[in-house]
Image (cartoon, rainbow, N blue to C red):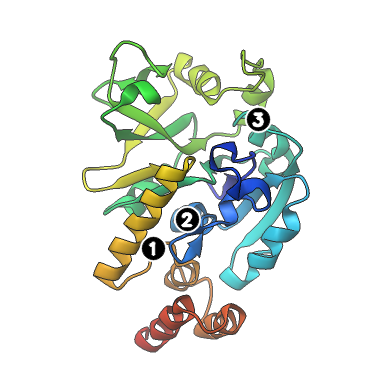
């Protein structure tokens, strides 16, 4: 069972400059909430309560103003600084002490997931005992992503980064589940031509051991990478459209915590005071009035 999760929220966000020169990308708004709320909500939906957020050097205080230690959500949040980007597997090396000998999930801080049945899929993934599991999503332009070829049992036969020839339309998303060997394997990696450790190389270690499986974001679900200005605003528009049509909020951390019975209505009242007079607080007010 996976009870620990990492959010990789470092990087310079150069594709969104100059917006990201003064503020970390994950603290910018996706509609009415900071981007960081969305990956954090995914870990909380997975029933993961022990979370490490990896941020750029000098930015911890910015995050702590928003989500100090997680106690207000009934979870435990700790932080670790990354002095410069060294690739996704570096998160496991930085988080070695946090991970210990436990299995761990990792989500990229700029990835957005949404869809019916997502919670059930996440709950299946956190039951991982050994090996690794990734979320796959069908795309129309697989040449822009790392893609996976799978068999009927969802075992991954091959992963290719930005393939020139078509092998599959299943993109590997930024949500991963690993067993306790991930730190050891990450340490064994050598930097690529980009001078970074590559997540594909880490996944291929598991694949060669026949221990890499997959989960799908089904039809009607959404996976969006907010790394560019265009995708960032597409995601914000998507959240606006869904929330205003349904009257429900995506990635409302307090709502997830309340449903999981990690906090009480009194905890939410304190959060309303913290957020002040805003639409998010109005939603929380309606939540505590409607829940029994």
First along the sequence among labels 3 and 1: 3
The reply to whether callout 2 and callout 1 are in contact (CB within 8 Å) is yes
Reading the image, the residue beneath label 1 is: 250
Question: As displayed, is residue 202 above or below residue 13?
Answer: above
- At 29% across and 62% down in the image, what residue appears? 242
Q: Is residue 123 visible?
A: no
Q: 169 or 206, which lies in front? A: 169
State the CA–CA distance, disc 3 to disc 1.
32 Å
- At 30% across and 42% down in the image, what residue appears? 217
Question: As displayed, is residue 73 above or below residue 194?
Answer: below
User: How would you rate the neighbour count of disc 1 (Cα within 10 Å): few for under 14, some for 14-19, many for 20 or more?
Assistant: some
- Nearest-to-viewer mark from 3 and 2: 2
First along the sequence among labels 2 and 1: 2
Residue 250 percent coordinates (x, y): 38, 63
Residue 70 percent coordinates (x, y): 63, 65
State the CA–CA distance, disc 2 to disc 1.
8 Å
Question: As displayed, is residue 160 above or below residue 11?
Answer: above
Q: Is residue 214 visible?
A: yes
User: How would you rate the neighbour count of disc 2 (Cα within 10 Å): few for under 14, some for 14-19, many for 20 or more?
Assistant: many
- At 41% across and 51% down in the image, what residue appears? 233
Reading the image, the residue beneath label 2 is: 38
Local secondary structure at mark 1: loop
User: How would you rate the neighbour count of disc 3 (Cα within 10 Å): few for under 14, some for 14-19, many for 20 or more?
Assistant: many
In this view, the residue farthest toward the top is: 165
Q: Quadrant of the C terminus?
A: bottom left
- At 65% across and 50% down in the image, what residue appears? 52
């Amino acid at each position: 069972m996976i009870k620990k999760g990492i959010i990789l929220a470092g990087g310079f966000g150069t594709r969104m400059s100059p917006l990201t020169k003064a503020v970390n990308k994950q603290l910018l708004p996706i509609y009415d909430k900071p981007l960081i709320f969305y990956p954090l909500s995914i870990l909380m939906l997975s029933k993961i309560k022990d979370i490490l957020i990896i941020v750029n050097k000098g930015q911890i205080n910015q995050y702590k103003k928003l989500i100090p230690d997680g106690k207000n959500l009934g979870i435990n949040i700790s932080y670790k600084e990354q002095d410069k980007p060294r690739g996704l597997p570096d998160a496991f090396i930085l988080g070695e002490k946090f991970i210990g000998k436990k299995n761990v999930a990792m989500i990229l801080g700029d990835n957005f997931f949404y869809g019916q049945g997502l919670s059930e899929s996440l709950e299946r993934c956190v039951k991982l005992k050994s090996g690794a599991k990734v979320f796959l999503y069908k795309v129309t332009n697989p040449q822009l992503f790392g893609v996976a070829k799978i068999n009927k049992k969802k075992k991954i036969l091959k992963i290719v980064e930005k393939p020139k020839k078509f092998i599959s339309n299943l993109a590997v998303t930024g949500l991963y589940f690993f067993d306790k060997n991930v730190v050891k394997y990450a340490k064994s990696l050598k930097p690529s031509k980009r001078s970074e450790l590559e997540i594909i190389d880490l996944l291929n270690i598991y694949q060669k051991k026949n221990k890499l499986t997959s989960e799908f974001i089904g039809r009607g679900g959404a996976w969006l990478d907010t790394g560019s200005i265009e995708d960032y605003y597409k995601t914000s528009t998507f959240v606006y459209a869904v929330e205003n049509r349904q009257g429900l909020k995506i990635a409302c951390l307090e709502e997830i915590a309340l449903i999981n019975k990690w906090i009480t209505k009194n905890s939410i009242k304190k959060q309303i005071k913290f957020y002040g007079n805003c639409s998010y607080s109005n939603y929380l007010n309606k939540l505590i009035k409607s829940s029994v």
